[in-house]
Amino acid sequence: MAETATLYDKLGGKEAIGSVVDVFYKKVLADDRINQYFKHTDMEAQRRHQTAFIAYALGGPKYTGRSMEKAHEGMNLQEVHWDAVVELLVESLQEKGVSNEDIQVIAENLLPLKPHILGK
Ligand code: HEM
């Protein structure tokens, strides 16, 4: 995990995350593949979700909330939703000037979460 912790710092820590979150969040809400999942979610929870998501991706400070299984329980999320979220994250990072090399590492770090988040 040393590599990802470095990425979190390299990209500017908490503040940098905040600005990626804003871009990512707008994209999520504008995307018909996934925005229905956030229809009944309050703003606070949404922002928490996006921040936790980005922090996870960058290997930031340990997340202490609900497990990924619990957080996404009953949503029956599928491959298409996963792909959409990763795609929007990649776009957001690109727009914020993160290098493709770093984005590649971020995407690889997220992969182990996939079986825990998708409904089977
Ligand atoms: C790497 C992928 C993902 C990560 C790291 C992640 C992270 C999280 C976290 C940490 C929470 C809990 C927030 C909290 O309890 O405060 C959460 C909840 C949630 N996630 Fe994800 N998520 C991922 C993928 C997805 C996908 C693909 C979708 C659907 C398109 C999704 C939709 C949601 C929704 C709707 C909630 C509930 C928000 C609420 O009302 O509290 N997530 N996610």
Image (cartoon, rainbow, N blue to C red):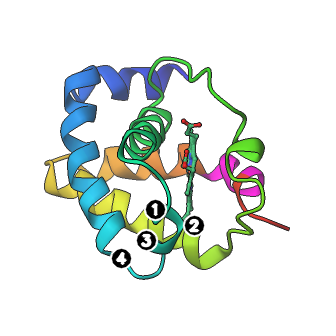
Three-letter code for the amino acid on which mark 1 is drawn: Val
State whether residue 8 is above or below residue 56.
Answer: above
Q: Is residue 112 magenta?
A: yes
Q: Is residue 70 magenta?
A: no
Three-letter code for the amino acid on which mark 3 is drawn: Asn
Cβ atoms under marks 4 and 3 closer than 8 Å: yes
> Label 3: which residue?
35
Give the Cα distance between marks 1 and 2. 6 Å
Dot 3, how many residues are within 10 Å of its Cα: few (below 14), some (14-19), or many (20+)?
Answer: some
Three-letter code for the amino acid on which mark 2 is drawn: Trp
Q: Nearer the N terminus, badge 1 or badge 4?
A: 4
Q: Nearer the N terminus, badge 1 or badge 3?
A: 3
Cβ atoms under marks 1 and 2 closer than 8 Å: yes
Q: Which one is nearer the viewer's eye here, 50 or 36? A: 36
In the rendering, at what x and y percent does residue 108 appear? 54, 49
Ligand 1 neighbours mark 1 (CB distance < 8 Å): yes
Q: Which one is nearer the viewer's eye here, 17 or 100? A: 17
Q: Residue at x 43, y 71 (%)?
A: 35
Ligand 1 neighbours mark 3 (CB distance < 8 Å): no
Three-letter code for the amino acid on which mark 4 is drawn: Asp
Dot 4, how many residues are within 10 Å of its Cα: few (below 14), some (14-19), or many (20+)?
Answer: few
Q: Nearer the N terminus, badge 2 or badge 4?
A: 4
Q: Residue at x 40, y 82 (%)?
A: 32
Give the Cα distance between marks 1 and 4. 12 Å
Q: How many marks?
A: 4
> Label 1: which residue?
86
